[in-house]
Amino acid sequence: MTAPAWLAATGVEWTDEPSVIAGRRVDRSGVEPDGMPLAVAFPRSVEQVRNVVRAAHSTRTSIVARGAGTALTGASSAGAGVLVLDLSRMDRILGIRPDDGVAVVEPGVITAALDRAAAAHGLRYAPDPASLEISTIGGNIATNAGGLRCAKYGVTRDAVLGLDVVLADGRLISTGRATLKGVAGYDLTGLFVGSEGTLGVVVGATLRLRPLPEPTTTVAASYADVAGAAAASVALAAARIQPVLAELLDEATLDAIDAAQGTHLRKTGSALLIVQIDGGAREAARAVEVLGRDATELRSTSDPEETAALLAARRGALPAIERLGRPLIEDIAVPRSRLAEAVREIGVIARRHDVPICTIAHAGDGNLHPIIVAGESVDAAEAAADEIFALALRLGGTVTGEHGVGVLKLPWLRRELGPANHDLQRQLKALFDPHGILNPGKAL
Amino acid sequence: MTAPAWLAATGVEWTDEPSVIAGRRVDRSGVEPDGMPLAVAFPRSVEQVRNVVRAAHSTRTSIVARGAGTALTGASSAGAGVLVLDLSRMDRILGIRPDDGVAVVEPGVITAALDRAAAAHGLRYAPDPASLEISTIGGNIATNAGGLRCAKYGVTRDAVLGLDVVLADGRLISTGRATLKGVAGYDLTGLFVGSEGTLGVVVGATLRLRPLPEPTTTVAASYADVAGAAAASVALAAARIQPVLAELLDEATLDAIDAAQGTHLRKTGSALLIVQIDGGAREAARAVEVLGRDATELRSTSDPEETAALLAARRGALPAIERLGRPLIEDIAVPRSRLAEAVREIGVIARRHDVPICTIAHAGDGNLHPIIVAGESVDAAEAAADEIFALALRLGGTVTGEHGVGVLKLPWLRRELGPANHDLQRQLKALFDPHGILNPGKAL
């Protein structure tokens, strides 16, 4: 299959070189799409995106927009007949206005690059998905990405004030605003955030920056079991403490880290809770007191190097688990009080299917990442994942806390939404994209 | 006109007593609707709401849902032929789950009542519109209400996790989730928040509660002029300080307060900035230092009684202004750096039209409330308001920061959104409400 003739007419840079296409038909989910995309286009301007989308619309060609391809759900996978719109070259920070607390960016900006640019003004871009050094703002917006510090500072949606979006027919709209507050009209901004490229192509974003807090206090507390760690996390709120992050690592995760890093984390307890506080010395002291009540060991620091050492366990968790075999990274959220129950049940599921599952949780907001070490047992891993989704719904939770739906969670989405909500969402999709050319078969 | 026969068949309590109807056809905007509504229904359950909406849908009867009627835009005004759906009797807090950081409520719950109930668990409901003692959660959701402390803690949207909504045809859907994080499907929750009852009737909400912070430090600083006060507010962010609230009162407002309360605020400066900090002693000390640089007078306290005294000026501002004549309370937002310019230009507009305008601003997020003292000069007041809206757009802002569109700002909405966005929003409205029975003629 060759690239369509109309592509050349749009003025956009493009290629149908198989090796380039091959790298842009998959994301980090492991989802293998059927066949090869037509071509990859590399727009450098809003006008080029409009040209491509307009032509795709009139020729009924499917488009998959992508940033860095770090999706864990297949959301940016692209199969036969699809044109890949690679937005990674639209990577300019168009402006940072410190006095307004606002940044204006193109979608291909790397998340951490924006955060660093903001830091030069004493500000920061708060959402911090684990992929922040490689993922793009556009991809973060497409999935409404979360992260560690969103327990206190919110997810991507909370940082997006306004968007420039190319609609399915090539029209350009601006949603939201350049002010910190505003309620004119329906919240289209929120509708595009998390829509995984199925409603429009985001070509620009006005983002909120927040004051960079003072140096933080970091506490690493070990507990006899996950229930103890989860209870300690819940106790923070009762003590009026709002942690920046509260990361829980279960026994299997600690074993994996010890094996990889030569540490002895499991010696001090079967669960580790890492908490960060930036609300001042008094809040930090209270946090140490609360977390220490049932801890088997506790370390606390405000020193940057020691902080990095305490966080090393969390940062090294995924690489350590990857040494055990190919990981299937899951992502559910439950009401915070059900966290211990969820981790315990995931352990039961792991034993039933005889697949190792290491669970890391953003405990502050009840968001769990059970990481299934698939190895050769792909069927067992998938069966375990299905049981984990069912567990999430049974506990009053959701099948995706921050990674999105993509293709991997499509079968579960309708169950979670219910038929009336799901039908309404399909009608919305049809309204925005009547010919179904935008990332078809994803998210809904 | 008499109430329709089908109303009795729905099982809902209702009345067409003219005195009851008269009190429920207007809100606090002063908008006078044409004619009298058919009747007022007082549902007490989701099923009753569904029965009424279903019957209204099949008879093509327009419905205006209302809570306490505190809208400032005409959003809850109801004219001839309309059925008013008064949700104020669905006022139960169905549950507070402190460990989850979540409350589940009916729409008629008074905002402050929820906040007090949360406080018993060391938590709070963060959004605090000035009307919080009389407005309902349902009304707050309908307008995406803001408030004072949203500079740090966000607006209503940020506190809404999930909604139960009766659609125009009587179907019931649940949007969002009961967890703190979740990205399954499109963000319908955000779409309903701020839609002013035009897309569905909110009959239940799952809300986020946050830890109640430690006692705060409050600073009241006077400045020689508005520019000085605005600059001090902007300087906080540069010093990495995130105030809970930052309220700016201009010269005309201080004069009104002095006249009403016998204070001497104007003696110490032509603008007053009241800032509250809850991020610990160090942040508070830095705030005092930053605010003090150019202040003509500064007072700071952490004592609850003294705090109340410092806030008394802000709380008493509207009553003081009301003594001057009937107020037209406006609501624009601009990029924070344009705040001083906006206040200055509003002063010019006031002089040009010879109407007093007192401006209070939530300086932390660039949201201004120019309060036009209309008196007898209704035409001059409206002309001044129009110039204020034009000013907001010229400065890169919005014609409504937190009060909504209702009917008063309809003429300006399309100008702000632009035709493509506005058309898309009208299509959305048609999708959700094909017969146009939900709060027709409002918000869009």
Image: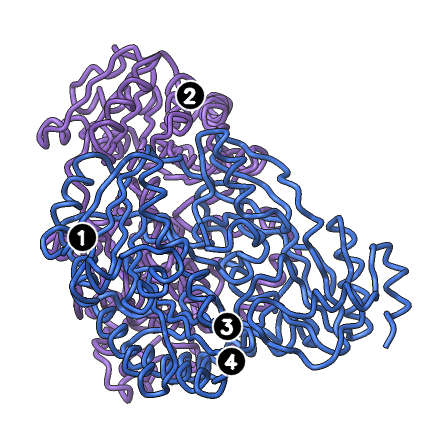
Chain colours: A blue, B purple
Q: For mark 1, does the 10 Å Cα neighbourhood hold few (<14), some (14 to 19), or many (20 or more) residues?
A: many
Of the 4 image quadrants, the one containing the N terminus of chain A is bottom right
Residue designated by label 3: A326
Of the 4 image quadrants, the one containing the C terminus of chain A is bottom right
Q: What's the chain of the residue with tag 4?
A: A
Distance CA(mark 3)–CA(mark 2) = 54 Å
Q: Which label belongs to residue B231?
A: 2
Q: Is residue A59 left or right of residue B438?
A: right
Q: State the SS at label 2.
A: helix
- The label nearer to you, 2 versus 1, is 1
Q: Residue at x 25, y 56 (%)?
A: A273
Please check whether the numbered discs 2 and 4 fall on a single chain.
Answer: no
**Vertical arrangement, residue A75 with respect to residue B316, above or below:** below
| Kind of residue at badge 2 | Ala
State which quadrant residue B26 falls in. Answer: bottom left
Most foreground residue, A231 or B17: A231
Q: Residue at x 69, y 70 (%)?
A: A25
- Give the x, y percent position of residue B283: 27, 28
Distance CA(mark 4)–CA(mark 3) = 22 Å
Q: For mark 3, does the 10 Å Cα neighbourhood hold few (<14), some (14 to 19), or many (20 or more) residues?
A: some
- Give the x, y percent position of residue A149: 37, 50
- Give the x, y percent position of residue A439: 65, 71
| Kind of residue at badge 3 | Arg
Residue designated by label 1: A236
> Earlier along the polypeptide chain: callout 3 or callout 1?
1
Please check whether the numbered discs 2 and 1 fall on a single chain.
Answer: no
**Vertical arrangement, residue A95 with respect to residue A397, above or below:** above
Distance CA(mark 1)–CA(mark 4) = 35 Å
- The label nearer to you, 2 versus 4, is 4
Distance CA(mark 2)–CA(mark 4) = 50 Å
